[in-house]
Every structure is written in structure tokens, then in C-alpha cells.
């Protein structure tokens, strides 16, 4: 079965640089979520999109932005990177509740290292 | 507001012995509950889910969990641990009335399961 695809899997950037992470949800999933997971931490919700519109916002810094495109893939743009942004970034997707399925399916993550 | 407590940050068992990972939740409504597993440097994989159907839920890899409303618990069990079960386990609570909101999917802090040979 198709899974959530994230690219790149690993990314190394320097401080103050920008980074773009991509997420391709499972086909027919209409909602995408972004999470940040620091070492030894549980995933922290950043932002979500439903049908290409932002549906919820969590602890996403102002330096970060995201969008969902017409083909439902999503991109997380991170600017003015800081050392503290080093983390594993997950994308998850789900179908809306009306279809009876609500659980989130996670991608393998992008490991971002800021030096 | 919803919250999840995982009472043990680390559980260590011997291979072939039972596993019990505890999860308690707080929710103002009948919640949906999930268990996810994360192996080192991997993504999160859904183990099982409770969505107001049967209170005893069977998942993948021999895991199961029982929803107990009176105890607000959703503990994860497995009769016999395998070395490959060593991972981080997250309990998640969600209000099924709220659609598509990321903050509705509340993670517990996680329990690290070690399996000794």
C-alpha cells in the first residue's frame, strides 16, 4: 500500500539558511499535518491543511511557513534557520472524518541538522 | 482540553515475557485513542485504534489494548515480547467531533520499551 512520502530524508543546513521540506500524502487523503520531534521528545504539532486550506496551527515559529498544493502535496518552508531547529520533521496524512477514517499515517521523516 | 499520561517513561522486559505499557487519558468527550510505535530513526507506525466500537482492540504484531472508560485507561499489552518490539511507544487521544485539526491529535510523552535477551 502507498505510504506518506517525505523528501529529502536528510538535510544539513547552516545557520540563517533556508530549507524546504516536501510531503506527499497517501492518495485520496485530504489532510496533511506537520510535526517537529526533538531528541527524546514526542512529536510537536506545527500546522495542518485540509483541502489546501490551513486548518490548524500549533507551535510553528513565524520563520516557518507551509502550504498545500492542488495535488495535495505540502511543503514546509523554514527560513533563518537556528541550531534549535535541528530535529526530525514528520508529515502525516489522513482522510476527513466523514469517510469514517481519522487516524494519521506518518511519513518516515526528514532529519534536519543545522550547523 | 485533552491530555495523555504515559505512566512509565521506560519499561524493560525479557524476551518471551508479557508487555504492559500504560496510558491514561483525559477528555471531555468519548475519545478516539491510538497507539503508535516508533523504531529508532524511523517514522511512527499505527499499531491500533479505538473508535467507540469494541473495547478490546487488536492491532498488528500481536499487540492489543483495552479501553476502560471507568479508569480512563487504554493500556497496551502483548503476551510475549520479541526483540523486534524494542522501540518508543506513543499513546494518542483525539476528540472525534473535531475534524482535521492538528491540535486535536494529542500525543503522550512516550514509553521506551527495552527487550532483554
Image (tube, rainbow, N blue to C red):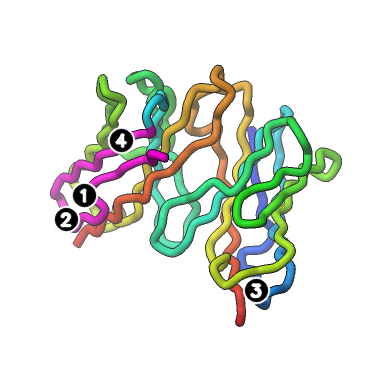
How many angstroms separate mark 1 from mark 3 (CA)? 38 Å
Residue depth check, mark 2 versus mark 1: number of the one nearer the observer: 2
Q: Earlier in the sequence, mark 4 or mark 2?
A: 2
Q: Are marks 2 and 1 in contact (CB under 8 Å)?
A: yes
Which numbered tag is attached to residue B12?
3
Q: Position of residue A66 (x, y in %)?
A: 28, 31
Q: Is residue B40 above or below residue A73?
A: below
Q: Are marks 1 and 3 in contact (CB under 8 Å)?
A: no
Q: Quadrant of residue A80?
A: top left
Q: Earlier in the sequence, mark 1 or mark 4?
A: 4
Q: Position of residue B38 (x, y in %)?
A: 49, 57
Task: Name the residue: 66% across, 34% down.
Answer: B32
Please state the extent of the stretch shown in magenta in the rendering: A1-26
Q: Which residue is mark 2?
A: A13
How many angstroms separate mark 1 from mark 4 (CA)? 23 Å
For label 4, the crowd category at 10 Å Cα-Cα, with few meaning under 14, some 14 to 19 and many 20 or more, is many
Q: Are marks 2 and 1 on the same chain?
A: yes
Q: Is residue A55 left or right of residue A111?
A: right
Amino acid at each position: 500500500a502507498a505510504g506518506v512520502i517525505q523528501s529529502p530524508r536528510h538535510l544539513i543546513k547552516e545557520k540563517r539558511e533556508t530549507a524546504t521540506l516536501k510531503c506527499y500524502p497517501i492518495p485520496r487523503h485530504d489532510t496533511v499535518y506537520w510535526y517537529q520531534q526533538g531528541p527524546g521528545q514526542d512529536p510537536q504539532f506545527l500546522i495542518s491543511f485540509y483541502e489546501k486550506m490551513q486548518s490548524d496551527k500549533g507551535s510553528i515559529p513565524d520563520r516557518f511557513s507551509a502550504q498545500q498544493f492542488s495535488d495535495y502535496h505540502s511543503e514546509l518552508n523554514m527560513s533563518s534557520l537556528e541550531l534549535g531547529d535541528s530535529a526530525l520533521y514528520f508529515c502525516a496524512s489522513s482522510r476527513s472524518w466523514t469517510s469514517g477514517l481519522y487516524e494519521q499515517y506518518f511519513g518516515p521523516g526528514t532529519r534536519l541538522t543545522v550547523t | 482540553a485533552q491530555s495523555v499520561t504515559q505512566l512509565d517513561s521506560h519499561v524493560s522486559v525479557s524476551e518471551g515475557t508479557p508487555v504492559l505499557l500504560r496510558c491514561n487519558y483525559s477528555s471531555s468527550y468519548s475519545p478516539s485513542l491510538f497507539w503508535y510505535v516508533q523504531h529508532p530513526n524511523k517514522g511512527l507506525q499505527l499499531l491500533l485504534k479505538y473508535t467507540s466500537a469494541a473495547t478490546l482492540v487488536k492491532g498488528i504484531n500481536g499487540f492489543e489494548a483495552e479501553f476502560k472508560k471507568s479508569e480512563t485507561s487504554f493500556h497496551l499489552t502483548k503476551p510475549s515480547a520479541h526483540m523486534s518490539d524494542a522501540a518508543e511507544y506513543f499513546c494518542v487521544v483525539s476528540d472525534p467531533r473535531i475534524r482535521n485539526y492538528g491540535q486535536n491529535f494529542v500525543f503522550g510523552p512516550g514509553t521506551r520499551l527495552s527487550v532483554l535477551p
